[in-house]
Amino acid sequence: MISLLTRAITHPATWLIWITPLVIAGPLSAQITVTELQSPYSFVNDPVEKSYFISSVNGEAETADNNGFITKLDHNGKLLNLKFIQGGKDDITLHAPKGMALVEHVLYVADLNTLRGFDTTTGKPVMALAIRPPATSQPEPLQTSLSDVTFDGKRHLYCSDQKANTIYRVDLTTQTVSVLITDRSLAGPSGLAIHPKSGQIIAVSWEKGKISEISPEGVVTEIVSNGFFSNRFQNLRGVDFDRWGNMYVSDFTTGKVWRMSWDKRFQVIAEFLPSPGDLSIDRANNLILVPYELAHAAEMNGLETPSDGKPKKEKRTLADYGFIPPPPKPAVEGSVNK
């Protein structure tokens, strides 16, 4: 495995070893690679402007060095501006950008102890909201270290603080912050996503490789965790959902991307990846977006539509991938077609 991983880092074309087939999604090719990044952390799509953004820490992940940057791609995945938003330039402050979320024309970025907002067209800052950690009994006060941010589709952003085992809620209307929950059972919440059907918050754990569900009221329910006979995950970094409600998680240490179906069945869809980070899903184009922190690059790939029971011997078509309409179902015997 070590030799394969080394080869994958050396040869970008082999980074994603997909178990499921790749497909062409609209104007995008099946695989697009973005290079010249610097410790990329998160990769998201903008459904409004049909563009893509990649955050690069560019240095130490916990250092306020004001040299982080965000890359912008067009709707075809073509590079528009490597440093569309750049710390230390044009009065922009951006230290170590990590997780990102889009709300209309604003890109929200988790940057150490601050949630920053930038105009997706101009790149100019529109918000900087400092977030304080919850009070503890420890002699040394905690320092906020935001790792991800997600939008609930209404008026709230949720931010994860991996070190403080905390999830914050940000009211966009009033731009105020509150602690939704602080709980050791979160085990270093890294990636966040909102379940597209239930509206619950999904958090993946960096420390114990578990997946938790948090209600808007702050109630934690464990969905999946490693057991005595099962050590599936190590350090989970990203989580998101496709249009069918299947969950995808990235394991930074094992170099795998997993898919979990509604019945909690897991499948490895990619492996031997060099440090897969905070992934996301472009649901409109059925693409998975994966940054590779240690390889200083990122990729987008087409996703297979999950099988709905088609016999293995029957040949799959583009309809199975959601890119052409499915063929009409045969009429029931004895019925009359109009």
Image (cartoon, grey):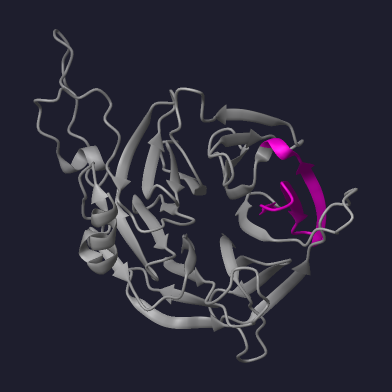
- Name the side, left or right, on which 117 lies relative to 196: right
Magenta includes 143?
no
Q: Against 168, is 261 above or below?
A: above
Foreground residue among 266 and 286: 266
User: From which residue to which does the magenta span run?
Assistant: 157-185
Task: Mark yes or no: residue 264 visible.
Answer: yes
Q: Residue furthest top?
A: 334
Magenta includes 176?
yes
Task: Mark yes or no: residue 49 visible.
Answer: no
Which corner quadrant of the image does residue 61 belong to?
A: bottom right
- Name the side, left or right, on which 245 lies relative to 7: right
Residue 259 x/y as whole percent = 38, 38
Quadrant where the image shows the C terminus: top left
Q: Against 202, is 330 above or below?
A: above
Q: Against 32, is 177 above or below?
A: above
Residue at 82%, 61% in the rendered image: 132
Foreground residue among 149 and 64: 64
- Name the side, left or right, on which 119 lies relative to 161: left
What count of labels does the image hold?
Answer: 0
Residue 97 x/y as whole percent = 59, 70
Please name the predominant secondary structure of the magenta segment in the image.
strand
Foreground residue among 139 and 103: 139
Residue at 73%, 32% in the rendered image: 219
Residue at 54%, 34% in the rendered image: 197
Residue 323 x/y as whole percent = 24, 47
Residue 125 x/y as whole percent = 66, 79
